[in-house]
Amino acid sequence: MPTRSAEELTARGWSVNAWGQGVLTQPIQAALRKTDSSLRWTPDLLAARDDHLAMIDCKSSMTSRSTRRHAIERAAVRSHFHLVAWTELPIYYVFDNLDVLTPYDALTAGQAGPHSISGSGAPYLLVPVTLCRAFDSTFGLPKRPPVASDAA
């Protein structure tokens, strides 16, 4: 489970469960990556607080320090629009620095990026960090400090 995002959400009173490819076995993950299925981009976490439920897609190492832009694969954004329509639940991209974007933010504010940020050859959208939502305004203020993980 993407630890930092889960810890920060928990500190704000959200219940968090791992979801998506991270809960699958490695052979299933490898096979899924070779398909064009939207399941490849299933968000990492499900989070609930009171009557609010959200899907969280954690974006690790997806920010350029030199250009200060976040990268999101176009196919992920497209799949997430379908998932939002199907589930009627919001999806949030949470980056290492806790910046937050939605698929709509990425589509409307993103600029076409290179086709191989991760070496995959896939096209990306690049979104300036200045256009991101704040984690606290999206998910609330901490009710208690996050617990440092052993893995961090």
Image (tube, rainbow, N blue to C red):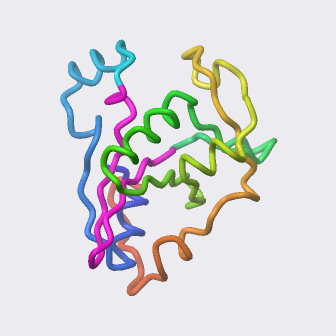
Image quarter where the C terminus lies is bottom left
Residue 49: in magenta span: yes
Residue 143 drawn at (x, y percent):
39, 87
Q: Quadrant of residue 144?
A: bottom left
State how many labels appear: 0
Residue 11 drawn at (x, y percent):
37, 77
Q: Is residue 148 left or right of residue 70?
A: left
- As rendered, which of 6 and 102 lies closer to the eye? 102
Q: Is residue 99 left or right of residue 138?
A: right
Find the residue positioned furthest to the bottom: 143
What residue appears at the point 29 percent right and 56 percent down from the top-left corner?
Answer: 46
Find the residue positioned furthest to the right: 67
Q: Is residue 135 above or below residue 103?
A: below
What residue appears at the point 39 percent right and 17 percent down from the top-left corner?
Answer: 36
What residue appears at the point 21 percent right and 39 percent down from the top-left corner?
Answer: 23
Q: Is residue 49 above or below residue 37?
A: below
Q: Is residue 86 left or right of residue 120?
A: left
Q: Quadrant of residue 27?
A: top left
- As rendered, which of 149 and 52 lies closer to the eye? 52
Residue 45: in magenta span: yes
Residue 19 drawn at (x, y percent):
26, 46
What residue appears at the point 31 percent right and 65 percent down from the top-left corner?
Answer: 53
> For the magenta stretch, what is the residue range?
38-59
Residue 150 drawn at (x, y percent):
32, 59
Q: Is residue 64 above or below residue 97?
A: above
